[in-house]
Image (cartoon, rainbow, N blue to C red):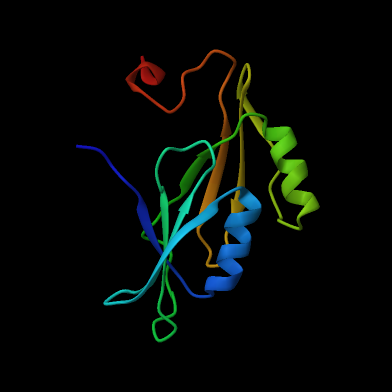
Amino acid sequence: MRMLHLGLRVTDLERSLAFYAALGYVKVGHVPGTDFGSLTMLQLPGDPFVSLELVHDPARPVEDVSAVNHLVVQVDDLDVTLAELAAKGVPTEPAAESGPGFKTSWLTDPTGYRIELVQWPPGHPPGMTAADFA
């Protein structure tokens, strides 16, 4: 068993697509007219699978994003990523170092979801495992 992707309801699909494209996501598919609304599948270039689905129904704007605390996206170099996002007009928060080579920063998507950007220290395996809490 494995997690495939997260479906996020968005109010403005075009603004959300532009935001996630600036973050590095690529649109790989679209399913119109489901019971949930339209579904747009996004994938990060280094990921083998779709990891984010934008769910849009103009008749049901998102009024509360509090059920989702935050999403996390791993980056190779946080300083470079923040500079690239700034050049694209995406507001970010300053990077914070939480340990040698471990940095984080935050941004907010057009619907209001919080996104944490994480840079692991050199040699850290991709993702988070039980070893990170030992």
Q: Tell me: 100 left or right of 51.
A: right
Q: Nearer the viewer, residue 37 or 73?
A: 37
Residue in the picture at 33% in, 21% down: 130
Q: How many labels does the image show?
A: 0
Quadrant including the C terminus = top left
Quadrant including the N terminus = top left
Q: Nearer the viewer, residue 8 or 70?
A: 8
In this rendering, the answer to whether 38 lies above or below 43 is below
Res 53 quadrant in image: bottom left
Res 131 quadrant in image: top left
Q: Nearer the viewer, residue 34 or 3?
A: 34
Tell me residue 112's x, y (percent). Answer: 53, 64
Q: Which residue ends up furthest to the bottom in the rendered image?
A: 59
Residue in the picture at 62% in, 29% down: 76
Q: Which of 125 and 95 is in front in this view?
A: 125
Q: Which residue ends up furthest to the left in the rendered image?
A: 1
Residue in the picture at 76% in, 55% down: 88
Tell me residue 54's x, y (percent). Answer: 44, 63
Tell me residue 129's x, y (percent). Answer: 36, 23
Q: Which residue ends up furthest to the right in the rendered image?
A: 87
Residue in the picture at 39% in, 43% down: 49
Tell me residue 46's x, y (percent). Answer: 52, 36
Q: Tell me: 96 left or right of 27.
A: right
